Amino acid sequence: MRRTFLATGAAAAASAALSDVSLAEEAAANPVSAPWTGPYGGVPAFDKVTTEQFKPAIEAAIDERRREIRALTVVRSAPTFENTIAAMENGGRTLDRATTIYGVIGGNMSTPEFRAVEKEIDPQLSALSDEITQNAALFSRIETVYDARDTAGLTPEQKRLSWTYWNSFVRAGARLDPAAKTRVAQINKRLSSLYNSFNENLLADEETYIPLVETDLAGLPDAIRSAAQESARERKLDAAGAIVNTRSSVDPYLAYATNRAMREKVWRAFINRGDNGDKNDNNATIKEILKLRAERAKLLGYPTHAHWRLENSMAKTPENAMGLLESVWPAAVKRVGEEVADMQAIAHAEGAHITIEPWDYRFYAEKVRAAKFDLDMNAVKPYMQLEKMREAMFWTAGELYGLTFTQVSGVPVFHPDVRVFEVKRDGAPAGLWYFDPFARPGKRSGAWMNAYRSQERFKGEVKPIVSNNSNFVKGAPGEAVLISWDDAVTLFHEFGHAIHGLLSDVTYPSLAGTNVFRDYVEFPSQLNEHWLPTPQVLNRFALHHKTGEPIPQALVERIQKAETFNQGFDTVEYLASALIDMKLHLAGDADIDPDRFEREELAKLGMPKEIVMRHRTPQFGHIFSSDGYSAGYYSYLWADTLTADAAEAFEAAPGGYYDKAVAVRLRQEVLSKGNTTDPADQFRAFRGRDPDPAALMRKRGFAPAKASA
């Protein structure tokens, strides 16, 4: 669902405009909040936006929003779907536009000046959201419509939308007494400030770097060496190279650098982000966040924050989520023991006289991969050109769903690196896709998808605008950007979210695209990863960056044979983060020292000493930069249970992963539905039954594969 504070009524909006023409004119003139104009149904005016414009634009839009709600609640006619729910859904357009641009700039082009604006604006947005959800007159109208949903002649989608609004208001505290409402609002306002502090601290640590001398570059493949050298040049360093403190820079270095002491230094800098006891330390911030979340949950009538968060999910309860995580943990830890034994054997054979440590894992994993499967991922990388992988994603989307992507010019962007593509399906307009692949100062780490505009048919046909954002490191000018196999998997993953948004086919924007339960939203994206290793993709698009020759078939076969290689590491690294997330949010109002809690709980779990959490607590942006994935990081595994089973549907079909009938069923029953129906019903409609949990274990190599697969 869109942010609650974005909703209002059409009649209310008109009334508000009449009551304050000057503010409306001001909002229309400010490019942050002005209606989007130009081609493709209008696009954000990124080229006209300045930092100074955000505060007046958003504050004016907030004032407009308040007037809209006030006008809506004084309507004397009896509440109906049209004058209440539909009116809510159609409103808030000005603030929606403003906060979209605000969020895009904050995630991709943050500066100290912009972060100062965030400190002022985010608490105001939080306060507005609480004002709306705690508005008794408004909630009374919503509840009246919701209670009559089965007798008012509503369509199934209208019933779902009515439930969505009613449910969001109840969960936000609409039924609380005045004192409790006030306290919840205070907590939310304080949390918004703490999330900003967490983000600012983490970004500060991720903008640091480690300079390298020539010997520190030993062992690095040409592409990784070139990226390190370019990082040093960009920062005007008198150094042979530099490793920036982000995953896209650190992981490749750990996999190939032969200087063990420097590997350890790089690793320690990375895993200690937000945890250095300095002004950027996040532990005190996390402690307060956990306390406030626990207090809010109790005020809202839930035992813990985890219970509150999971009520609206496929899992329903923390116990169900923990049950899944814990069922996979023993097999994953056992596999780690086997992986470490293989690494240790190679280290001994080489006369290294070391015990495998976390900064050795990636390095020796590559040696084991080469020994067991005759596969050197460094030999794969020359064939993994970023641009060719982008073309591969486009091709698979065309084969499966009839989508085509054509780069266009003249569309404003927020940085020269960003490119825009017009998307069509079977020749008809389907939306726009923005691609922002490269790291830069002020950009948050990782990879993600954004929906700038959701698809809708409510007030005319509106096509979606989506983006994919990554943090790949540029090589030397003029050279192809080569990415790792894991990076290519992530690229396909995030593109799966984009497809989910682009194929949406619903009436109301709050129910469109990726506006689904947190533990369902990762299902389409994880499923999309499965097309990368198909021969159809690799033979067409895995082309050597110098010769243009396709990747050798023998190398493709070795990649396929090594499909479940290192799954112990990948699964334990992830599960540790998911389990700690859930345990932190099941601890209630306990006085938690984040560092100690992490150490003690991991020890209880039997965490292998050779691995750390994928996201250590002081840098766990998924759960502490917003409510986001808090008590929800388990979602990736939950969704992967669906993914594994869905993949087997393709594998068993006559056309394999390119079977047209299965692809059509996936689009019709899942990708186009958004949140118009319950996700469990969507999966059943696609698969014909509930998911088979054993498929997950087969996918990860922890159980025998199906003969039919």
Image (tube, helix red, strand yellow):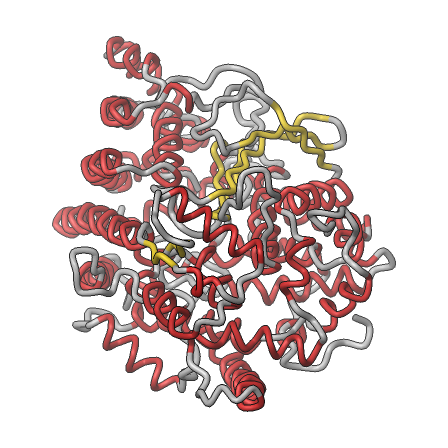
The answer to which of 517 and 253 lies nearer the viewer is: 253
Q: Quadrant of residue 34?
A: top left
The picture quadrant where one finds residue 100 is top left
Tell me the quadrant of the picture where the N terminus can be found: top left
Q: Position of residue 508 (x, y in %)?
A: 52, 33
Question: In the rendered image, is residue 135 in sight?
Answer: no
Name the residue at 25% across, 14% down: 23
Q: Who is closer to the viewer here, 676 or 138?
A: 676
Furthest residue toward left? 179
Instruction: Pick the residue in front: 34 or 280.
Output: 280
Where's residue 84, x and y in %? Answer: 39, 30
> Left of 284 or right of it: where is 345?
right
User: How many marks are shown on the rendered structure?
Assistant: 0
In the displayed structure, does residue 556 sit left or right of residue 683?
right
Q: Quadrant of the C terminus?
A: bottom right
Compared with 530, 571 (above or below) is below
Residue plotted at (46% across, 59% down):
313
Residue 702 in which image quadrant: bottom right
Residue 638 spot, x, y in % from top left: 53, 66
Q: Is residue 104 visible?
A: yes
Point 24% across, 70% down: residue: 594
Q: In this orientation, which residue lies closer to the viewer: 310 or 365?
A: 365
User: From the viewer's perspective, is residue 403 above or below residue 634?
Assistant: above
